[in-house]
Image: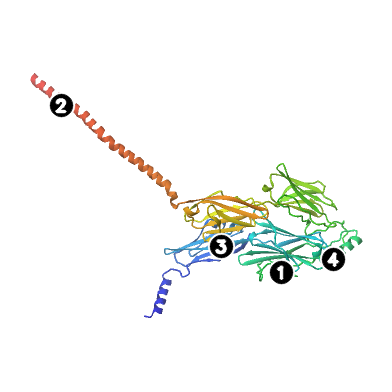
Amino acid sequence: MEPAPVLLLLGSLWGCSGRPADRLVVTPREPLVPFGGSTELNCSLACAGGKVEWRGLDTALGTISSFSTHSILHIRHATVATEGMKICQGSCQGQHYQKTATLKVYALPDTLRLEAAPHILRPGHPARLNCSAMHLYPIDGVALTWYRGHQVVKTDFDSDDDDEELYKIVSILSVDGTEVSEGVEFRCEVTLQVGQKTFTKVASLVASAEAVTEQLEAEVTSTGRPSTARPVAITTLPPGPSVPEGDPTTAREPNTGTILDLAAVTNPPSTEPSVPQDLIAGSPTARVPTSTLPGSGRAGTGPSAGTSPEITTHVSESSGKLILSCNMSAPHLTITGHKWIHREKILEQDENPGAFTSYTIDGKKEEHSGVYECVFEANPQIKGQVNISVAPQVTAYKKSEHGNEGDMGVLTCKNPSFPAVISWSWHKSGHGLLENSSGRYIIKSSGNKTELRILKLDIEQDTGDYFCNGTNSYGSGDATVNLRVRSRLAALWPFLGIVAEVLVLVTIIFIYEKRRKPDEVPDDDDGGSAPLKSNATNHKDKNVRQRNAN
């Protein structure tokens, strides 16, 4: 028989033996889920009488539907904690299989906010542009780029996370009057890259002298309030991913479908009292951006806003307290109160009509870093921003970790302070810098959190102190985690100790009994035989006397 038919016959017999050709199959292998979204992971094994199941602690974050040949992991309302590696195991006729799926979660806001101060972007006048977005994740995949026309002018931003581990980013671009010319476009572009997919949001402003002229004419000829559009843009793009060609930092042609040329839009004058118009279309709130505070706590002041109010912010330390203050310059609006907000929570509010407000915090700035907002209750609202920025205050999730030999160890560090960490690194005492390329270490970092995963723990190599270090533009901070690796037989030692104690007690009792019997048994025999002999003699004597008497 020729070799080819033999191989075909053997292959058909192998396929008919009940052993599946592709064994365990998991789909999808790299699912990408939006924050709050849902997905399903399917693990199947084409084997009659086989068993398939999802394993691991992460499966508790979803629900599982199991069948004879497959198992489905349902993910609902995905959060940052949901992402990670999911493990599926199967068995068939004594053979065991394992496959994994890596789930990633991303968050991208529907809108990108772009504001200018002063409110009108006028040719020949300096301006301050503020680009911000909320609810972003993961932060290490975010890039923000400022363009002037087709030229890249700035690429950095500040970030802060909330309780859900989602991030808010802010970037401020200050431009000189020489850079603001008629028709020049300033564009803010935010991209989020997750795996092989890239999401993009764009907002832009165009400088125009026509809007300034129209506003001045409306103010002179009308006793009411002119409704003039301001150079503030909120751009909403479809949620679907877009993969740009080439380098994402390369300047692109302006997208006329997403550019809001607000300087050319003017509505007829109104009979309402003249007050500064709302900066955001459809919103009663206007924001006046202020400069970011350096680590020393000193505040900067934005450029002159012309007829619009300007807010000067300041923060100082005194006797273990932080004093944050905001002062609104002329022209003063009708102020009915103030609010101080941090992480979208109102810290303090009052009904004072003054143009100055302050807020006092007990403690050091390292304990209360973050973005604070002072709100002047007027029509419209005016907001100032105070950033308390410090070096990373790195803390270990657990100062001491334990792991079993052969298992994977996970060490975690976090940075609760503002701004977020730019770069993370891990070191081991006596070893030096740890890197992903080593093959035994996997480092996963995302903004204010970093994880070190050690594959196949070894008692001799991996036991010791590990140091996590985080760095941002204000300095660096570190924390120490002690790792103890236990033998797989460690759980048997208590049992073996109990067995040893029982054996010792049994041995002591046995030896005691053996030593006791030879000394005490002969005494009992002697004591018992003497009375018997005496009794026998007495009976004989008694019988003898009785015979003599007869």
Label 1 sits on residue: 251
N-terminal of the two: label 2 or label 4?
4
* Mark carried by residue 536: 2
Percent from the top left, x then y, of residue 22?
A: 48, 69
* Three-letter code for the amino acid on which mark 2 is drawn: Ala
Classify residue 143 as left or right of residue 334: left
Q: Can you name the residue that lies furthest to the bottom here?
A: 2
Q: Position of residue 111 (x, y in %)?
A: 71, 62
Label 1 or label 4, whichever comes before in sequence order = 4
Q: CA distance from mark 3 to mark 4?
A: 53 Å
Of the residues tagged 1 and 2, which is closer to the observer?
Answer: 1
Whether pointer 1 and pointer 2 mark residues with C-beta atoms closer than 8 Å, the reply is no
Please tell me how crowded label 3 is: few (under 14), some (14-19), or many (20+) other residues with Cα within 10 Å: some
| Quadrant of the frame with the N terminus | bottom left
Q: Secondary structure at mark 4?
A: helix
Q: Which residue lies under the disc numbered 3?
A: 102
Name the residue tied to disc 4: 209
Q: CA distance from mark 1 to mark 3?
A: 33 Å
Quarter of the image with the C terminus is top left
